[in-house]
Amino acid sequence: MRIGLVAGPWIPIPPVTYGGIERVVDSLARGLAAAGHEVLLAAPSESTCPVPIVPGMRAAAPHDMGSTTSELSHVVRAYEGLGDVDIIHDHTMAGPLYVHSPRGTPVVTTIHGPLNANAVDIYRAIARRAAIIAISRDQASHAPDVPVTRVIHHGMDVSQVPVGSGTGGYLCFVGRSCPDKGLLEAIMIAREAGLPLRIAVKMREHDEVRYFHEVIEPLLGPNEDFVGEVDDATKYRLMGGALAFLNPIQWSEPFGLVMIEALATGTPVIGTRIGSAPEIIEHGRTGFLGKTGDLAGFVGAAAGLSRAACRKAVVDRFSVERMVDQHIRLFMELIESGPAGGVPHTAHVHQNL
């Protein structure tokens, strides 16, 4: 197949540091190419993903993050450069609504964010002309009237992640500086458990900086080691040395990529039973899930979990090969059934996991 992938305009593919969606698009592009398909990627011009990039794309615009005009301009350029593909897989929100997409080319989009009221209106409209992928059953359950064609969990290239020893004697947290990610809760959990906490967070946007300075920074003491934003190699070393990874999220996260990254290093995850977490973490085997106030009590037991089992869970359930294979099967179905009017929506979501 000739497959067009559309990423967002704000972060290169792959990202240098933070960028979960961009990391998934990079893995998907590489995996599809390795499977023998032709991949054309519409992404910021300085992207280094080893597949052809659509000519004429602009450079990444991180300071325009969330800007409608930035995304629309990017989409126009992307679709102009994807006129000769068999299928378009779009990871933006505006792209699947673009009326000048190549005639006769089926479009599929992945929902990367929460299905709140505004997003539901948008994806109902998208569903008239494109197939929709959800990234977890929990995400899809929040809007049962949005027709989802597949649920496909994210995957990652485990071969690029070293297995850590877990002997660093600390807990760790990796995420964004915001209330939803549970950084405040992680600090309290580590203190209650009597273990130091190493913290690596993205802190670029105004709200992220303000939350850190107003809420987190005044709390930091000798028990916390603030590392800042890190690259992949540093992140995996940090995770791999930890006794456990803390993920006390405070919202229904559609898919917590950071959880499978931690498991890939062999480190069990302790987190709240919210959102997609129960689809990722096997309670008592690869980590522990519960209410925020109960999580410190799981730290001792986490030390006894098999790090090999944590790693194997990612190899078996969240590999890039599994993710790519499920996308290929869907793409072939969509090409066979044709563009708008032939989208194979289902009354009940395909589990396909």
Image (spheres, rainbow, N blue to C red):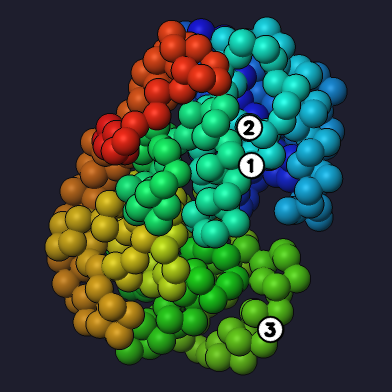
In-front residue for pair 143/286: 143
Q: Residues within 10 Å of mark 3 (few under 14, many from 20)?
A: few
Image location (x, y in percent) of residue 147: 42, 38
Task: Report the residue marked by disc 2.
Answer: 96
Q: Residues within 10 Å of mark 1 (few under 14, many from 20)?
A: many
In-front residue for pair 322/142: 142
Q: Quadrant of residue 165?
A: bottom left
Q: Amino acid at mark 2?
A: Pro
In-front residue for pair 141/180: 141
Q: Residue at x 36, y 61 (%)?
A: 275
Task: Report the residue marked by disc 3.
Answer: 213
Task: Report the residue marked by disc 1.
Answer: 93
Q: Amino acid at mark 3?
A: His
Instruction: Say which element carries label 3.
Output: helix
The answer to whether mark 1 and mark 2 are in CB contact below 8 A is yes
Q: Residue at x 32, y 89 (%)?
A: 192
Question: Residue 289, labelled with which disc?
Answer: none
